[in-house]
Image (spheres, grey):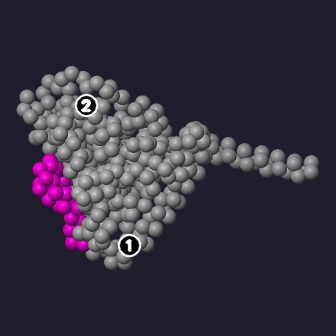
């Protein structure tokens, strides 16, 4: 027994030494994958107030979440007198963990609007409510439960066609820990079954908060947690790809869905589009009912704006589609019909990318031309959105 105990102690000691060495090595090479999110009764998940850490899986930036759970600087609830306050809603493109927030499109928007004649003499304040993974349902709930406290003059919805439509239907998204909306005789009804999901309840527990705290302070635990999340995401991706009919094409860009480039080919996709359009219309009505301005902006998927014609055409041929702007054009038709101000970015980003022979998506540490916007994408998008907003503002 003494020998067995001694051997056990040696094994434990060796494991601890190996863990310490691994921890030191990960810190030395600058690895970090911080826990930035927490369970949220409004939206399933939200950014964790005060969380911070180095983000390096795509791009690189030391991320700090403010005291109210926004990837932004601190903002007072009370709007400063004589200011123009804009709230932006969106997903990971708006959250923009991949680069310093001074380079994010909403920061560019704020700076560009300082030069707009309609803002002369007013301070422009843009507040970022973007959270990775959010669909339109969560963005509508964010508007209702979080945005109005800041009394914005304008609300901008950054819409990503690549996954926002899928995000809005339970049977396509297959994520039980988020809210959805159902259409009942044309009326949106909240489906908040996630509140009773065991996984969600665990994330609300003291045990999970303790675990998240430990992970936040250990690079080794962050690595193990990142591997676990990637394995889970890969399994879900394979499951979703396997569920698609062969003629629908494979999911070629991680996190995005090629079926958005086609008119709905199934009842589920028809429902997803119908619910999504109803959510956008509800958001526009609620903003306009508050006598504020609303702007819908469709962003871009990497495949839509590859500056190299041969690569872009090869993608289109592989999935069997002639027009990669179908989802953006469908939104444009809906917006025109319902009188919703709308800006379509993808074709204009493609023009810039081709003119400058430069990708507006992608990073050297994660592949060029795919993934999220890089600094070029954010800069051009911010400038284009600022031009649209400036035109919408009443003259002073």
In the rendered image, residue 73, in percent from the top left (x then y), is placed at: 36, 31
Q: Is residue 336 magenta?
A: yes
- The residue nearer to you, when weighing 299 against 167, is 167
Find residue 93 and name its label.
none
The furthest residue to the right: 2
Q: Please name the residue shown 68% across and 43% down the image.
A: 20
In the rendered image, residue 38, in percent from the top left (x then y), is placed at: 48, 42
Q: Is residue 159 magenta?
A: no
Tell me where residue 349 sits by quadrant: bottom left
- The residue pinned by badge 2 equals 151
- Left/right of residue 314 with respect to residue 123 in the rendered view: right
Q: Please name the residue shown 43% across and 52% down the image.
A: 193
Question: Is there any visible trace of residue 248 in the rendered image?
Answer: yes
In the rendered image, residue 28, in percent from the top left (x then y), is placed at: 57, 42
- Left/right of residue 242 with respect to residue 30 in the rendered view: left
- The residue nearer to you, when weighing 146 against 296, is 146
Q: Compared with residue 223, is residue 48 higher up or lower down, i.e. above or below?
A: above
Which segment is the magenta one? Answer: 321-349
Query: What secondary structure is marked by label 1?
Result: loop
In the rendered image, residue 12, in percent from the top left (x then y), is placed at: 77, 47
- Left/right of residue 115 with respect to residue 242 in the rendered view: left
Q: CA–CA distance between discs 2 and 1?
A: 43 Å
Question: Is there any visible trace of residue 259 in the rendered image?
Answer: no
The furthest residue to the top: 81
Between disc 2 and disc 1, the foreground one is: 2
Count of numbered labels shown in the rendering: 2
Query: What secondary structure is marked by label 2?
Result: loop
- The residue pinned by badge 1 equals 244
The furthest residue to the front: 185
- The residue nearer to you, when weighing 196 against 352, is 196
Q: Residues within 10 Å of mark 1 (few under 14, many from 20)?
A: few
């Amino acid at each position: 027994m003494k020998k067995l105990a001694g051997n056990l102690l040696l094994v434990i000691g060796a494991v601890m030494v190996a863990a310490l060495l691994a921890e030191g090595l990960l810190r030395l090479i600058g690895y970090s994958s911080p826990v930035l999110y927490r369970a949220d009764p409004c939206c399933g998940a939200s950014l964790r107030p005060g969380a911070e850490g180095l983000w390096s899986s795509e791009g690189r930036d030391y991320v700090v979440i403010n005291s109210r759970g926004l990837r932004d600087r601190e903002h007072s609830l009370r709007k400063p007198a004589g200011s123009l306050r804009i709230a932006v809603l969106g997903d990971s493109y708006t959250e923009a963990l991949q680069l310093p927030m001074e380079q994010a499109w909403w920061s560019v928007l704020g700076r560009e609007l300082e030069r707009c004649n309609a803002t002369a003499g007013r301070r422009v304040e843009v507040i970022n409510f973007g959270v990775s993974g959010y669909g339109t349902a969560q963005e509508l709930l964010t508007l209702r439960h979080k945005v109005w406290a800041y009394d914005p003059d304008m609300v901008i919805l950054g819409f990503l066609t690549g996954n926002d439509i899928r995000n809005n239907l339970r049977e396509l998204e297959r994520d039980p820990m988020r809210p959805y909306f159902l259409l009942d005789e044309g009326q949106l009804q909240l489906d908040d079954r996630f509140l009773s999901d065991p996984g969600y309840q665990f994330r609300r527990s003291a045990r999970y908060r303790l675990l998240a705290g430990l992970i936040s302070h250990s690079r080794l635990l962050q690595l193990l947690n990142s591997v676990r999340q990637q394995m889970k995401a890969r399994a879900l991706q394979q499951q979703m790809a396997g569920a698609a009919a062969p003629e629908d094409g494979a999911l070629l860009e991680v996190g995005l869905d090629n079926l958005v480039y086609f008119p709905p080919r199934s009842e589920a996709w028809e429902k997803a589009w119908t619910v999504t359009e109803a959510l956008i219309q509800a958001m526009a009505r609620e903003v306009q009912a508050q006598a504020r301005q609303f702007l819908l902006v469709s962003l871009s998927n990497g495949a839509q704006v590859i500056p190299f014609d041969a690569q872009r055409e090869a993608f289109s041929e592989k999935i069997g589609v002639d027009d990669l702007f179908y989802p953006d054009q469908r939104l444009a038709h809906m917006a025109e019909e319902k009188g919703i101000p709308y800006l379509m970015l993808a074709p204009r980003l493609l023009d810039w990318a081709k003119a400058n022979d430069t990708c507006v998506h992608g990073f050297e540490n994660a592949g060029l031309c795919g993934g999220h916007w890089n600094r070029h994408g954010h800069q051009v998008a911010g400038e284009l959105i600022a031009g649209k907003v400036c035109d919408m503002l009443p003259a002073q």
